[in-house]
Structures are given as structure tokens and as C-alpha cells.
Amino acid sequence: MTNIVNTGNASVDALAEMNISGNVTPVNWYKTILRENGKPYLLAICVLSEIVYWYRPVEVRDEHSGMTIDYRKKFREDLLQKTYNDFAEQFGESRRSVKAAFDRLEEIGVIRREFRNIETNSGMVLNNVMYIDLCVDRLYTCTYLNIPGDDEDVENTGEEIQKQAENQANKPVTKFCTTSYKTLWDKYKEYYRKYRGDYLSYHSIRHRREN
């Protein structure tokens, strides 16, 4: 069978026909989601990536026009409900390690845990059920730290970037997110449009300089 894609590399051609799905891990998280010793907190990054996946909205499209007419959330209740054991099983880690990763994410201020007593349909009461809130303002800071805007920014050293990340991680934050889901989503769209415009503008100018 002949590959439709022909890039000159067999592996690239084969990969073009694979539909790979999964969570998104921005590179900047390796500079902002850190352990106390300043090293990237890999488990916390994986946990955050999974939480962000659940908070990313799903498009609702019109059946006839195909246009996006609305967005909906993936989880059923007002906040995401998952347990430490859910994450431990998913990532092959211990419950204790997962809880420590949650502790660090909450210290950074990118998530908030809320524990509730809930009653099931059968009348059974479950105590201390964990719900997870995502603090989008803090997530934006951790994700878009030091976005290049000119040549001077591009030349920043790794030491300077590390210092910025530590300052962000140690900055006092409010751990309670009371903003409505719609307001957070509106802010996310606003940030995305601004960042995408700055990014494209920067690379357009840089391309003209190189040519």
C-alpha cells in the first residue's frame, strides 16, 4: 500500500496516518511546575495535564451548518470529581505520591480541592468526596511564562527563566476559585486570542528578518 504522505522519511510518513490522542503538556510547565528543589515535578505535571483535559470544553456544532453554536463541560457536576486512587491507577503511582503532587499543585495555586459529603441515589452518605477546581488565571501564568516578544526576550538564559519560575511558584496566591465556569472560559478565550496574535506577529517579523 502506497503512503499518501511522502516527506522523504518513512517514519514521518507512517506517523501521518496514525491518529494519536492524549493530554497536552505545555513545555513551560517543566519550568513552572517544580519540586521544592527546583526540578520539574513530573507526576504533578501529568496530574495537571489530566485535570486540564477534563476542563477543556467540548464543542457543540449545528447539525446542518456545522458551525460551533455552544460549548459544554465533560463532567456532570459543577466541579470535576476524581479520587487520588483514580490518578494513582492511571499513572501507575501510589496514592501517597499522587496526594503529594496535588499538595504541590495547590501550593502553586493552579488547582483547588474541595471535599464534600454527598448522598447517593440509594441514600448512602459518602464523606469527604474530593472535587477539583482549576484556577485558570494561575494556569495561564504557569503556561505562558516568558513568551518571546522580541529578540531580547529570545536570548534570555535558562538561569533567568528558572528564577522567574521560582518567583511565580513562591508568590502568595488565593487558593479558592469562586469564579463561574462561563467567566473562566470567557477569560481563556480572551487570553488565547491575545497570545495567538502576539505569537503569529512575532514569528512573522522574525521570518521577514531571516529572509
Image (cartoon, rainbow, N blue to C red):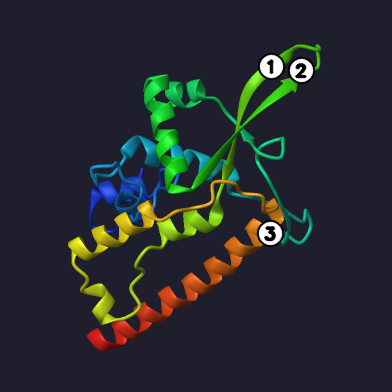
Pointers 3 and 2 in contact (CB under 8 A)? Answer: no
Per the model, the C-alpha gap separating discs 1 and 3 is 31 Å
62 displayed left or right of 198 = right
Quarter residue 206 falls in: bottom left
- In this view, the residue farthest toward the front is 172
**Circle on res. 120:** 2
Residue occupying image coordinates x 24% and y 47%: 38
Per the model, the C-alpha gap separating discs 3 and 2 is 30 Å
State the quadrant of the C terminus: bottom left
Precedes in sequence: disc 3 or disc 2: 2
Residue occupying image coordinates x 70% and y 52%: 180
Q: Is residue 19 visible?
A: no
Q: Is residue 65 visible?
A: yes
Label 1 environment density (alpha carbons within 10 Å; few <14, some 14–19, many ≥20): few
SS under mark 2: loop
Per the model, the C-alpha gap separating discs 2 and 1 is 8 Å
SS under mark 1: strand
Disc 2 residue type? Answer: Thr
Name the spot of residue 132 as percent of width and height, x first.
58, 37
Label 1, on which residue? 126
Label 2 environment density (alpha carbons within 10 Å; few <14, some 14–19, many ≥20): few
- Labels 1, 3: front one: 1
Name the spot of residue 91 as percent of width and height, x first.
40, 27
Pointers 2 and 1 in contact (CB under 8 A)? Answer: yes
State the quadrant of the N terminus: top left
Tell me if residue 146 comes above or below residue 3 in the rendering. Answer: below
Disc 3 residue type? Answer: Thr
Disc 1 residue type? Answer: Leu
Residue occupying image coordinates x 49% and y 20%: 85
Name the spot of residue 102 as percent of width and height, x first.
45, 34
Label 3, on which residue? 183
- Please tell me how many numbered marks the rendered image carries: 3
